Amino acid sequence: MSVEIPNIRHLRVFLEVVDCRSISRAAPRVFLSQPAITQAIAKLENTLQTQLFLRGNDGMFVSDSGKVFALRVRRALELISSGLKSALSLGGNRETTAIRLLQGLTTTGLRALVAVSEAKNFSVASRNIGISQSSLHRAARDLEAMLGFILFEKTSTGIITSKAARVLVKATKLAFSEVVQGRDEVNSIHRREIGRLVVGSMPLARTSLLPNAINKFNQTFPDINISVEDGIYDDLLNHLRQGDIDILLGALRFPLPADDILQQELFCSPISIVARPGHPLCRLASISLQQMQQFPWVIPREGAPTRAIFQAAFRDAQLVVPSRIVESGSQVLIRSLLLDSDRLTMISEHQIQHELDLGILQALNYSLEHADRPIGITMRRHWMPTKTQRYFIELLEEHGLAMATGNS
């Protein structure tokens, strides 16, 4: 994560002052002097460009910005604490407690852990986070020594992380995401609507749903950058669960592939069998699966919902599933393959509505049973969106409703 994350010790100090309403009362609880605490709070306020406390004769009272940020910091530290407990158990260290380790953790050490786990190479990781390789090595080894279990192992193909390390990496990335959300909410309070929204997008969402939401969103928030991450579902889901992506948009999966996510359906998209205009089957008023079985196909890879529908259609009719296939989820490639051959594909009508309207492709006169694909939003189960993120979701819900009722 390229966004600057405050020192974890400063975040812990900040929460203690929030709870104690006094620097003097917080000092013995965090084992720091009052001047050190004052300096830590000042650094946080400078980073966030806001006043976190209102100072008075009877104590320090958290400001509106401080309340918003404190909620996010508390969630972040709880995530790291939970990750530490799981990592300690997996790493076999039963002599140290998560609370004790949390007091010694540094943002530098955790950033090193995340960077090396992602790059699988110390040299690449050091460039990615902008520190020297020697500093990165030292931070990673210091963290490993403090935790009391192995984080990294060298192999012939690079650095691999232990299972305990992977648990802590996930917790760290989710915690850092909470801190970034807290910063964005503080900026929003001061009408500094800046930041970044990261959306994972499956093919169907890119044709209408996502472009419509982005354009409307940027009319209200022109200074918030939106990053759209494309990829296969499993990769995007992993990035969502790790906190790299805010929401995932596209075909929903049933049953849920993980217990730490939630799905929200926006609309259902009918599946059609599609070919080029002039395809031999386009001239027929009635088409059977036996006839379509004789042609080559281009279909999504195993695990995709449409692939399951494709296989079920032939198996339910007690027919052999066609084996002359090209596997691809790329709409551009699918269109090119169809136009230059007699291939068929099974695809959502919403996904290729533009091509159908222009007559570039044609849906065959065959109705598939139970072949609607639920399209919607996938989110982390305990994710708490900011007001800005919530507004983007509302735009998706609005356009999804229009598509469901045929008013898009």
Image (cartoon, rainbow, N blue to C red):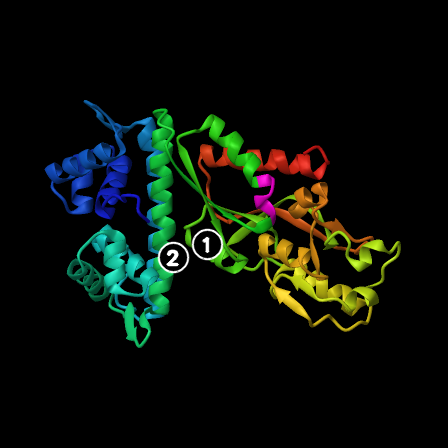
Main SS, magenta residues: helix
Kind of residue at badge 1: Arg
Task: In the rendered view, tell whether residue 173 sits above or below residue 192.
Answer: below
Distance in Å between CA atoms under marks 2 and 1: 8 Å
**Which residue is at the front of the view, 183 or 207?**
207
Q: Is residue 106 visible?
A: no
**In contact (CB < 8 Å): disc 2 and disc 1:** yes
**Quadrant that contains the C terminus:** top right
Q: Which residue is mark 1?
A: 241
Residue 344: x %, y % from top left: 72, 60
On the image, the x and y values in percent for residue 103 come to 22, 52
- Residue at numbered disc 2: 170
Location of residue 398 in the rendering, given as x and y in whole percent from the top left corner: 61, 33
Q: Secondary structure at mark 2?
A: helix
Magenta stretch in the rendered image: 204-209
Measured from the top left, where is residue 298 in percent x and y?
66, 62
Between 321 and 67, the one lying in front of the other is: 321
Residue 47 shows up from this direction: yes
269 or 240, which lies in front? 269
